[in-house]
Image (cartoon, coloured by chain):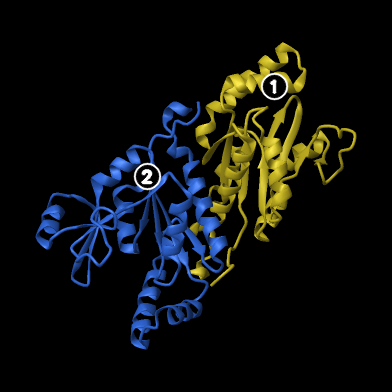
Chain colours: A blue, B yellow
């Protein structure tokens, strides 16, 4: 009767910049051996230290556009004149073999994935404790110009408007508590009756 | 933006006899101060040590039947000529004040509660690792006659047939792991977007 889980799940984390999503993803991947990070394809040029197949799959714009036509992507987007997309086949291979796949994406990507694979997705919005705290974090962190911070805050406010499209909301006031809650969500999602194969019952 | 959860949730645990539900409930209540146990009304006579309002609300059969007519119960059932029921008002008071309420009931009760308050319920079925293990547990535990054990096994099999009506299935192979998973489910359910008041977003 045991251990008959059939497929993995797609675990989406989103948050505004400064929300703490990247640190949460890093810790999750470190402590959960069944979880794999989704690797995107991009037309952006590799930065120093970035490796093909580890950080990104690097594509030319022409290649990327061909792949769009071939329905190669689970989701894709254009940001600042660069394309970013998630190769569908790679994801299917992971979840078919029982791995859960972690996605570090924004609400637009989350929405595309949920529309295509509603039964396999669990989505979490990481909420800053307040806009004031978020601004303070951006100010401390980046040494960015005030205009950059203001444009990030505008994006953050837009992102937060979509929080209610997610299955869960975790307020990142205390990092350890937020991490524990995200881990609990992953654990609970794995115990969902709908995730078990019929043979189990 | 924080701490605007409006209402508590109804957390249902069910399992066949010997599944480990009672021990799980006891541990949950010990470690989670926001969780309260639902107290049933019953027409059964008090046993030595049982206190009115702590273990049960004791009623005469006539009183109980009047209360059924008055829609006093969230769910009720008759077992071995005794009535058992959950007073609705008491539960509403608890969840309105933000407490989560733990229910230790069978699939018939779970089904009644889910039908009446679908938005507030999270239900977990505690699954024995196998029928063989369940039988061994009943044999070790009870010093019961073989016929008693066989009738318990029959009830267990019927209960397991309804496992797929629950939101979650937790296999109780290892008690500590099962307890951690049940705690995770409670924690995840509290982080569900649908549990936050609109003001949050």
The residue that label 1 is drawn on is B138
Is there a contact, CB below 8 Å, between mark 1 and mark 2? Answer: no
B18 relative to A33, above or below:
above
Q: Name the residue: 43% across, 58% down.
A: A26
In terms of depth relative to the viewer, which is nearer, A75 or B176?
B176
B158 relative to B193, above or below:
above
Q: CA distance from mark 1 to mark 2?
A: 37 Å
Q: Percent x, y for residue B140? A: 72, 20
Furthest-right residue in this view: B48
A51 relative to B170, above or below:
below
**Kind of element beneath mark 2:** helix
Q: Percent x, y for residue B10? A: 62, 49
Q: Percent x, y for residue A42? A: 21, 61
Q: Name the residue: 44% across, 62% down.
A: A125
In terms of depth relative to the viewer, which is nearer, B5 or B169?
B169
Q: Can residue B37 be seen by looking at this rendering?
A: no
- Neighbours of disc 1 within 10 Å: few (<14), some (14-19), many (20+): many
Q: Name the residue: 61% across, 34% down.
A: B174
Q: Chain of mark 2?
A: A
Furthest-top residue in this view: B146
Q: Name the residue: 45% across, 67% down.
A: A20
The residue that label 2 is drawn on is A119
Q: Would residue B135 be found to the left or right of residue A46 on screen? A: right
A191 relative to B147, above or below:
below
Displayed quadrant of residue A164 = bottom left
Q: Would residue A114 be found to the left or right of residue B136 on screen? A: left
- Neighbours of disc 2 within 10 Å: few (<14), some (14-19), many (20+): few
Q: For the image shown, how many numbered marks are present on the structure?
A: 2
């Amino acid at each position: 009767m045991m251990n008959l889980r059939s497929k993995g799940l797609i675990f989406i984390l989103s948050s505004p910049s400064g929300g703490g999503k990247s640190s949460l993803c890093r810790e999750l991947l470190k402590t959960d051996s069944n979880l794999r990070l989704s690797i995107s394809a991009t037309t952006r040029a590799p930065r120093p230290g970035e490796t093909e197949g580890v950080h990104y799959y690097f594509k030319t714009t022409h290649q990327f556009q061909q792949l769009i036509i071939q329905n190669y992507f689970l989701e894709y987007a254009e940001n600042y004149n660069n394309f970013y997309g998630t190769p569908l086949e790679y994801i299917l291979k992971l979840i078919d073999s029982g791995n859960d796949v972690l996605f570090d994406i924004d609400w637009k990507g989350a929405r595309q994935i949920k529309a295509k694979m509603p039964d396999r997705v669990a989505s979490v919005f990481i909420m800053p404790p307040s806009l004031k705290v978020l601004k303070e974090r951006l100010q401390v962190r980046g040494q960015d110009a005030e205009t950059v911070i203001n444009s990030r805050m505008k994006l953050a406010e837009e992102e937060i408007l979509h929080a209610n499209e997610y299955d869960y909301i975790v307020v990142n006031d205390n990092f350890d508590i937020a991490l524990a809650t995200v881990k609990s969500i992953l654990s609970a999602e794995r115990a969902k009756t709908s995730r078990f194969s019929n043979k189990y019952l």
